[in-house]
């Protein structure tokens, strides 16, 4: 997993989020309020929920972020994490301690590099199915 994770506040703008993502070469950023994880924002959120809807660069992160945060715990079994990623159709998950503090983000790429097992193939297959949180075939969030 990636441990050095940059966070953003919900009151910051999508312009700031996009700039940070470009600097970090990242497509996702956790959103924190105080010491709590309150959402995730992706480059796709900015494109689909902001730009495509005619919202400007000064739109707040809160307006376009996903506030239903899916996550795993740092001591979860990686096979279970991969299955969960396939089920909920995401490529990355925030990793939390049991007291819900962010310690990193795990991606399918991280898992593939660490052992390249069949679980990654299974997760990719599940994620690639139509539907999911940011699907073009599912309902849209406005």
Image (cartoon, rainbow, N blue to C red):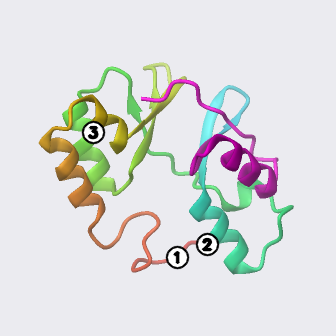
Task: Give the distance between the C-alpha atoms of the residues marked 3 and 2, in whole angstroms.
Answer: 29 Å
Q: Is residue 50 rendered to the left or right of residue 110?
A: right
Q: Which residue is mark 3?
A: 112
Q: Which residues are magenta?
A: 1-30
Asked where in the image residue 112 lies, by quadrant, the reply is top left
Q: Is residue 66 rendered to the left or right of residue 126?
A: right
Q: Which residue is mark 1?
A: 140
Residue drawn 42% across the image and 71% down it: 135
Task: Give the distance between the C-alpha atoms of the residues marked 1 and 2, in whole angstroms.
Answer: 9 Å
Which one is closest to the eye, mark 1 or mark 2? 2
SS class, disc 2 = helix
Q: Which residue is mark 2?
A: 48
Which one is closest to the eye, mark 3 or mark 2? 3
Label total for image: 3
Mark 1 / mark 2, whichever is N-terminal = 2
Q: Is mark 1 in CB contact (under 8 Å) with mark 2?
A: yes
Q: Where does residue 73 sit, x and y in percent of width and height? A: 38, 27
In which quadrant will I find the N terminus? top left
**Neighbours of disc 3 within 10 Å: few (<14), some (14-19), many (20+):** some
Q: Where does residue 31 sit, x and y in percent of width and height? A: 65, 41
Q: Is residue 70 above or below residue 98?
A: below
Mark 3 / mark 1, whichever is N-terminal = 3
Q: Where does residue 91 sit, x and y in percent of width and height? A: 38, 50
Q: Which mark is residue 45?
A: none
Residue drawn 72% across the image and 44% down it: 20
Mark 3 / mark 2, whichever is N-terminal = 2
**Neighbours of disc 1 within 10 Å: few (<14), some (14-19), many (20+):** few
């Amino acid at each position: 997993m990636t441990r050095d994770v940059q966070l953003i506040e919900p009151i910051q703008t999508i312009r700031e989020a996009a700039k940070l993502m470009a600097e970090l070469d990242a497509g996702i950023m956790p959103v924190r309020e105080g010491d709590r994880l309150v959402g995730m924002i992706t480059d796709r959120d900015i494109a689909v929920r902001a730009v495509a809807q005619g919202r400007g660069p000064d739109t707040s992160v809160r307006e376009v972020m996903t506030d239903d945060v899916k996550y795993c715990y740092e001591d979860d079994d990686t096979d279970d994490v991969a299955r969960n990623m396939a089920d909920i159709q995401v490529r990355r998950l925030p990793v939390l301690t049991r007291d819900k503090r962010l310690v990193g983000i795990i991606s399918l790429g991280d898992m593939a590099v660490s052992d390249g097992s069949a679980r990654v193939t299974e997760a990719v297959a599940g994620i690639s199915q139509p539907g999911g949180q940011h699907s073009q075939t599912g309902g849209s969030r406005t």
